[in-house]
């Protein structure tokens, strides 16, 4: 328990440092605001595989439980069709539907179209370094504007045992930048930063599980800051 708390504190501190730097660079005149915190559980079930030749797909469902792991925070459904340009580069076009519960019982629905580039950059330090770039077009049921958002993830994994990929150490960071303002609350500039530390465990075939701690730091539309401490469990079913 002590080691988990130390790990959580380290990741949270790194996230705050990066987020503060990004926020200052993009909005240097904004004053500091108090940060609220929450404990959450995120689950992700993803199926992926080839369709024909270089054509591939992925489909995922993500329930997220918040408010001290007491109630649904959001549910995300996402799917995409991709094309493998090379052994290290793939492009995707996809769509996502997000359900956001509210206190009055009426969900806010968000629709997203997105374009994505997955790139295996290289294999430094006996591991693998990769990136994911995603450009989103977002619409919400409580407004009429379309919001543009750019997301960039850097990910590194490395086997914990020589000559075996059964268990890998895994870290990644993903920054979100909103590119415009909308009538439903998106503001231009730094949006959020996610930082993850955990393990990737090999399952049957090429399927894997990723389990660990994710820190989510959000610069909310109101100017308030939010930090979510997330127990993250992701299952990838590959065929």
Image (cartoon, grey):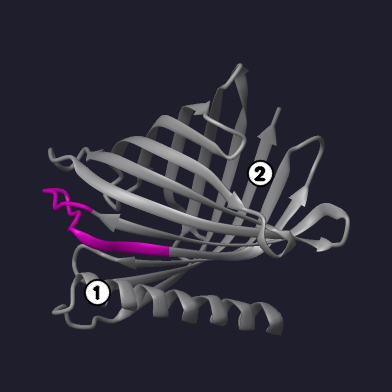
Secondary structure of the magenta portion, mostly?
loop
In this view, 11 is above or below 99: below
| 130 magenta-colored | no
Residue 57 image point, x, y percent: 54, 26
Which of the pair 225/165 is nearer the observer?
A: 165
**Which range of residues does the magenta coloring cover?**
179-193
Residue 150 image point, x, y percent: 32, 50
Give the side of residue 236 with respect to residue 43, left or right. Answer: right
Nearest to the eye among marks 2 and 1: give it: 1
Which of the pair 131/31 is nearer the observer?
A: 131
| Secondary structure beneath label 2 | strand
> Which quadrant is the C terminus positioned in?
top right
Image quarter for residue 158? Answer: bottom right
**Which residue shows up at 57% across the image and 21% down it?**
54
> Which quadrant is the N terminus positioned in?
bottom right
| Secondary structure beneath label 1 | helix
**Which residue shows up at 14% across the image and 53% down it?**
181
Which of the labelled discs sits on residue 25, or is there none?
1
Which of the labelled discs sits on residue 235, or is there none?
2
Which of the pair 181/64 is nearer the observer?
A: 181
Q: CA distance from mark 2 to mark 1?
A: 36 Å
Q: Of callouts 2 and 1, which one flags the residue occurring earlier in the amino acid sequence?
A: 1
Structural crowding at the residue carrying mark 1, measured as other residues with C-alpha within 10 Å and reported as few (<14), some (14–19) or many (≥20): few
Q: Name, please, the residue furthest toward the right.
A: 163
In this view, 15 is above or below 115: below
Q: Name, please, the residue furthest toward the top.
A: 52
Would residue 107 be visible to someone looking at this image? no
Would residue 226 be visible to someone looking at this image? yes
Residue 18 image point, x, y percent: 40, 75
Structural crowding at the residue carrying mark 2, measured as other residues with C-alpha within 10 Å and reported as few (<14), some (14–19) or many (≥20): some
**Which residue shows up at 59% across the image and 37% down it?**
46
Give the side of residue 210 with respect to residue 81, left or right. Answer: right
């Amino acid at each position: 328990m002590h080691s988990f708390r130390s790990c959580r504190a380290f990741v949270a501190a790194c996230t705050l440092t990066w987020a503060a730097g990004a926020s200052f660079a993009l909005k240097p005149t904004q004053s500091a605001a108090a940060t609220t915190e929450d404990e959450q559980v995120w689950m992700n079930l993803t199926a992926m595989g080839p369709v024909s030749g270089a054509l591939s797909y992925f489909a995922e469902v993500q329930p997220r439980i918040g408010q001290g792991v007491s109630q649904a925070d959001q549910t995300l459904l996402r799917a995409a069709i991709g094309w493998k340009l090379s052994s290290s580069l793939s492009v995707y076009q996809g769509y996502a539907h997000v359900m956001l519960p509210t206190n009055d019982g009426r969900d806010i629905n968000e629709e997203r179209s997105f374009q994505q580039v997955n790139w295996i950059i290289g294999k430094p330090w006996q591991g693998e370094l990769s990136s994911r770039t995603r450009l989103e077009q977002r619409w919400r049921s409580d407004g009429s504007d379309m919001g543009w958002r750019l997301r960039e993830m850097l990910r590194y994994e490395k086997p914990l045992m020589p000559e075996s990929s059964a268990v890998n150490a895994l870290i990644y960071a993903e920054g979100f930048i909103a590119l415009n303002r909308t009538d439903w609350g998106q503001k231009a500039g730094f949006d959020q930063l996610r930082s993850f530390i955990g393990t990737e465990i090999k399952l049957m075939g090429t399927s894997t599980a990723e389990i660990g701690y994710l820190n989510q730091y959000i610069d909310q539309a109101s100017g308030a800051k939010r930090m979510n401490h997330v127990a993250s469990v992701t299952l990838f079913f590959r065929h």
